[in-house]
Amino acid sequence: MAERDTTITELPEPRRPAPAESTAPTNVATVPADTDPDATGPAPAETVPEVSGLTVLAYGLGGLGLTGRFLHLWLVQQKGLVVSAGEVLGITFALLFGVSVIGTVRRAQRS
């Protein structure tokens, strides 16, 4: 049997991303600045809603409650560290799943 030459003599050229100018959409309509003094270009397609202060407060209180529950399980009830962390992570997952479902239902009602 003849031996094959398995050495790599030349590596392929790595792929490079296309320049930003070529990927920009060309059919975006803009309002000339001289016709509308407030025009700054095309409006964003979708804006991200701002999170209310009440939501941030609720998340903070929830985090403190979960931390307190962890410390209570671990230090007061003398359960193991892993068991305490597992229970708190399970509660956290269930709460986040509920928040996700509620947010999905509310967003669907808005549209």
Image (cartoon, rainbow, N blue to C red):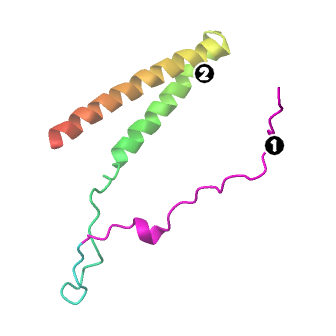
Closer to the camera, 62 or 17? 17
> Does the magenta-highlighted stretch encompass residue 5?
yes
The crowding category of the residue bearing disc 1, from other C-alpha atoms within 10 Å (few below 14, some 14 to 19, many at least 20), is few
Residue at screen point 40% across, 29% down: 96
Residue situated in front as seen by the camera: 14 or 100: 14
Residue at 63 percent of width and 9 percent of height: 79
Q: Is residue 104 above or below residue 69?
A: below
Answer above or below: position of 71 versus 107.
Answer: above
Read off the magenta span: 1-28
| Label 2 Cα neighbours within 10 Å, binned few <14 / some 14-19 / many ≥20 | some
Residue at the image position 45 percent from the left and 23 percent from the top: 93
Query: Looking at the image, which residue sits at the far bottom?
Result: 34
Q: Which mark is residue 71?
A: 2
From this view, report whether residue 26 is shown above or below residue 63: below
Instruction: Look at label 1 and name its amino acid.
Output: Thr
State the residue at coordinates (22%, 90%).
34
Which image quarter: residue 73?
top right
Q: As shown in the figure, which amino acid type bears the numbered disc 2?
A: Leu
Q: Which mark is residue 7?
A: 1
Task: Kindly state the secondary structure of the residue where label 1 is placed.
Answer: loop
Which of the two residues, 3 or 64, is positioned nearer the viewer here?
Answer: 3
Question: How far across and down, in percent of the image, does residue 57 sit?
Answer: 41, 42
Callout in the foreground (2, 1)? 1
Horizontal side of 84 relative to 23 (left or right) equals right
**Camera sees residue 103:** yes
